[in-house]
Image (cartoon, grey):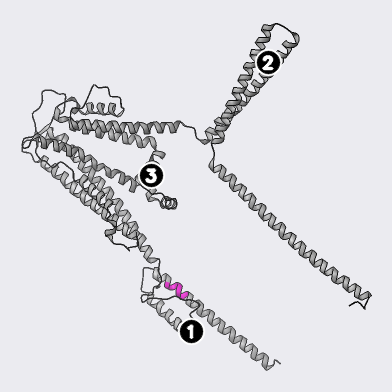
Amino acid sequence: MPSPAREESNGERGQAKDGAAERGDDAGGRLVCALEMEMTNRSPHGDSKVDYVNNCDGLVGRNCGDSAQVSVPLSLHGKRTTHMEGDDLYRLRDRKLLLEDRKRLCALALGTALLGILLMIIHAEMCPFVYKPGSNAALVINSSISLSTGCLLILIIAFHYKDVRLFVIDNHNQVDWRIAMTSHRVLVITLELLVCTIHPVGSYWEEGPRSNSSSSAQLCVSSHHGEALLGMELLFSVLMFLRLYLVHRAILLHSKMLLSASYRSIGSLNNINFTFRFVLKVLMNQHPARTLLVFILFFWLTASWMLTLCERQTQASTGHMETALWLIAITFLTVGYGDVAPNTSCGKAVCLFTGVMGVACTAMLVAIVTEKLALNKGEKHVHYFMLDIQISKRIRHAAANVLRECWLLHRTNLTKGNRGEHRRHQRCLLEAIRVFRNLRLKQRKLRDYVSEMVDLPKMQMIMCDLSANWNNSYRELEQRILSMEQKLDELSRCFQQSSELLSQVLRHRNPEIR
């Protein structure tokens, strides 16, 4: 029969187990409630939040004395009072939307600018052939150019507004938008608005007197204004091409590098700013011929048309498109035959700018061709390896020639033959020595040049292998030291046991020894 003391101890153990189980259930319940609250806060539906809060409040009320296990402080709306990642998620979402809006606004601004330039070209080209005295076609096209200019200004302002908002969001909405309006930003916005405002506003174009010479295009003149205003209209038409600065912004915002999260992450880790210069370098690295060809063709056509527009006032041969194409081409290539020359100041400025751009593009073309013709690392290694083998063979042949000429000279000295033959062998020996020395010098220079071509990835792999070998040797040394310590411990234990056995044996033989 079990004793009463044993029954009491078993009852206490059972109560302790039940209490531990209850505490475990309460802790598990609080953990489940915390997880449910977290999932409810992240879920878009908020109807079930009240039930979870009531259940968890009841659970906390039942275990109000034990709050050290799971502490999930809740606010009035069932959210944590600490800093949640929801704000960061909302901020990232707003930032992504702003980036998309910037890209869309930039594309619309570029399209509007190109539309205005196209309308200006149509207005300048169709004027002598379509417009009649008293016609409203010129007024319609000029009004369309002005309307596109107004839309462009609105899009530019909207783009910079999104840029300022992006600056505020990047600073965790903790700064005022006026801080973003630095002097540099204000200057940039002002210059952009001034450039985009320039456009021809006159609607006075009529068919002018035709020249008997067919050497130039027909010119539209004004019957209501003077020649100075006509020159201003031509100047405004040429300056409208300054709106093409939006191309570089569109290329930057629509580039794969800026849209790729991996590019941005690696760039931020390496402190690289994704500017148009970086994007242009990448394009010239990946597609050099295509990028340069597109730029040269676009610049050639644009500069040729600008030259025809500038030269139409003089009724000269440069007013024709084919003559302007020839003049721009020979100026771009810095040839300058001198058979055709611009007559107006505007045309001379266009040709001067064309010459400068031609020098820059020629330098880039030479760099691209040099890069394409250069050998890569593998080709250089193969080429220099084969050169080294060939030079080694030639050195062996030269050394054999030196030995042969020495033997022939020695045989001539022994036989005491003709002195002319002796001098001939001496000259051959000196020539063989010179060839041998030159080949050795060439081989030394080649190996010095090859040794300068340091392959950094290979050196890095070698250093990694060396460090791995050192680490392995260090681990093996540690293991050996540990094994030696264990053996020393075993030896000390054996010595102790042997001393104890020896003392026991001595006591057994001599009981008087204690």
Q: Is residue 232 above or below residue 250?
A: above
- Depth check, mark 1 against mark 3: the one in front is 3
Q: Residue at x 25, y 52 (%)?
A: 186
3D distance between C-alphas at marks 1 and 3: 62 Å
Residue 480 image point, x, y percent? 72, 57
Q: Is residue 111 above or below residue 329?
A: below
**Residue that numbered label 3 is attached to:** 278
Question: Relative to the observer, which residue lies in front, 140 or 279?
Answer: 279
SS label for mark 2: helix
The image quadrant of residue 20 is bottom right
Instruction: Say whether residue 33 is magenta.
Output: yes
Identity, as a three-letter code, of the amino acid under mark 3:
Phe
Residue 222 image point, x, y percent? 8, 35
Q: Earlier in the sequence, mark 1 or mark 2?
A: 1
Q: Earlier in the sequence, mark 3 or mark 2?
A: 3
- The magenta segment: 32-37
SS label for mark 1: loop
3D distance between C-alphas at marks 1 and 2: 109 Å
Q: Residue at x 25, y 33 (%)?
A: 303
The image quadrant of residue 18 is bottom right
Question: Relative to the observer, which residue lies in front, 187 or 363?
Answer: 187
**Residue that numbered label 2 is attached to:** 405
Image marks 1 and 3: residues in contact by CB distance under 8 Å: no
Residue 214 image point, x, y percent? 14, 23
The residue furthest right is 509
Q: Residue at x 34, y 46 (%)?
A: 252
Question: Relative to the observer, which residue lies in front, 115 or 200?
Answer: 200
For residue 65, the mark is: 1
